[in-house]
Amino acid sequence: MRILDGETAPYATLLQTLTYFRWLFSEIIKANVAVVRAVMSPDLKISPTLVRIPTPQNTDIGKVMFANSITLTPGTVSVDIQDDHILVHALLSEMSNPADFAEMAERSAWAIGEDIDAPRETGDAS
């Protein structure tokens, strides 16, 4: 029985996680500028959208880190997490392209040391 694993004690990837947070902070600033421009424009270019974003992460902590990163980014909120996707509400339609979230998915997985190319565990014990 493993009492400590990568999810309960993620100290082995601390440097990777801090590097990811630095990148995420820059993405938060970029998104913040886009949202302020849209909200402050005279014609109010807001176009709320719900979109399913695929999650390549295999672990719960990987999915949660990805979903929290989406929610921290201004203009987007993670509404629901499923096995293979996250339902995201985007304030602007240009923020709702699933391909635009691919880099964040890869970087958040890397930050916790998760191999996203590994096959998913289905939970089937057969």
Image (cartoon, rainbow, N blue to C red):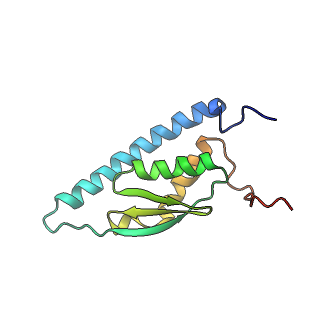
Give the residue displayed 39% in from the left and 50% down from the top.
Answer: 73
Left or right: residue 2 compared with residue 83? right
Give the residue displayed 40% in from the left and 47% down from the top.
Answer: 72
Quadrant of the snapshot with the N terminus? top right
Q: How many marks?
A: 0
Give the residue displayed 39% in from the left and 63% down from the top.
Answer: 89
- Name, please, the residue furthest toward the right: 126
Quadrant of the snapshot with the C terminus? bottom right
Left or right: residue 3 compared with residue 76? right
Q: Is residue 71 above or below residue 86?
A: above
Residue 28 placed where, x, y %? 37, 47
Residue 57 placed where, x, y %? 63, 54
Left or right: residue 116 compared with residue 68? right
Which of the two residues, 27 or 62, is positioned nearer the viewer here? 62
Give the residue displayed 67% in from the left and 46% down from the top.
Answer: 114
Which of the two residues, 1 or 51, is positioned nearer the viewer here? 1
Left or right: residue 7 compared with residue 23? right
Which of the two residues, 12 or 65, is positioned nearer the viewer here? 65
Residue 22 placed where, x, y %? 46, 38
Residue 53 placed where, x, y %? 52, 64
Q: Is residue 99 above or below residue 22?
A: below
